[in-house]
Image (cartoon, rainbow, N blue to C red):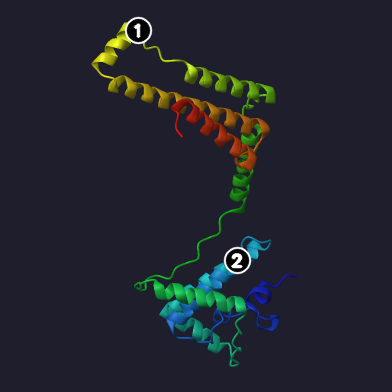
Amino acid sequence: MFDPYHKWLGIPPEDQPPNQYRLLGIRRFENDPDVIEAAADQRTIHLRNYQAGQHVELSQRLLNEVAAARVCLLDAGNKAAYDRQLKSQGELKIAPPISPTEEDAAWQAAYDSVRQQSPAKPRGEPRLAPPPPPIEDDLDLQKSYKRVRQRSQSKAPPPVPRLSTSQVQQEAELTKRRVTDRSSEPESTGSPRLQRATTAGEDEPRAMTEFGKYILATVACGAIFLLYVIACVFFGWERGGGLIPMLIFFGAVTATWKAITGAV
């Protein structure tokens, strides 16, 4: 049979049922309220670790006993009556102190550090350990979460249209051909309107022509980038498909930009 006093608190069967001092792991008839409160906090933190295991009811019972011991020993009247009761029972043999384990020492160190960092609060009514959350509600929440997750996973995303390799190559060739045709078109200077503009001043038409080239180059580079994205989606490339596809992409963008704008 599982013995929570012995397994969790180190109280052997011959000392059971333990008195409240033995339950908190302090010497009998301890009068320092800070020592009593610190020991109760340490026991509470330690026992809460077992609430998620298979002995939930036993851990809750021990938590209630620790909370009752805290309330009794921190009240002067209740403590005096309890001490008289222990003395009247003839328990003259003082129980040996519990040797702290490594886990208890770690919890005590963590509690001391938090207690030193937190500002001192006036002592009021003793704090009771909050009851653990009901297990049935937790199970219902987990079931609801699983149902929602299964519904979200059942809704598949819309399929991404995939282009064949020949279609991608045709689109790239068509784009290059359009860019080459536009860049190779001769500028007509024989129209009367252009001649009048030339006689009025050649700076403004030249600036507009240069601006149009940059706009055209930007659009062409954007089309090449769109084709590169479609190829990445089609072939399932991750991180751009590697070094060779990225070099081809940047080479095509650079060549297109130079061909349209005439930049060196």
Q: Classify residue 166 by image quadrant.
A: top right
Q: Does residue 118 appear anywhere in the picture?
A: yes
Dividing the picture into quarters, in which one does residue 6 lie?
A: bottom right
Q: Nearer the viewer, residue 149 or 169?
A: 169
Residue 204 image point, x, y percent:
29, 21
Depth-wise, is mark 1 or mark 2 nearer the camera? Answer: 1
Calculate the distance from the C-alpha at mark 1 to the C-alpha at mark 2: 91 Å
At horizontal 63% and vertical 30% (from top left) the residue drawn is 231
Residue depicted at x 47% and y 15%: 185
Q: Is residue 242 visible?
A: no
For numbered disc 1, what is the local secondary structure? loop
In the displayed structure, 7 sits above or below 99; it is: above
x and y percentages locating residue 211 in the rendered image: 37, 25
| SS category of the residue bearing label 2 | loop
In the drawing, what numbered circle is on residue 168? none
Badge 2: residue crowd in 10 Å (few <14, some 14–19, many ≥20)? few
Give the residue pinned by disc 1.
Answer: 191
User: Which residue extends farthest right?
Assistant: 1
Pointer 2: what residue?
49
Location of residue 176 in the rendering, given as x and y in whole percent from the top left corner: 56, 23
**Image side of residue 254 versus residue 9, left or right:** left
Residue type, mark 2 in image:
Asn
Count of all numbered marks drawn on residues in the image: 2
Residue 187, x across and y down, in percent = 41, 15
Q: Quadrant of residue 5?
A: bottom right
Q: Is residue 155 left or right of residue 108?
A: right
Q: Amino acid at mark 1?
A: Ser
Q: Nearer the viewer, residue 2 or 73?
A: 2
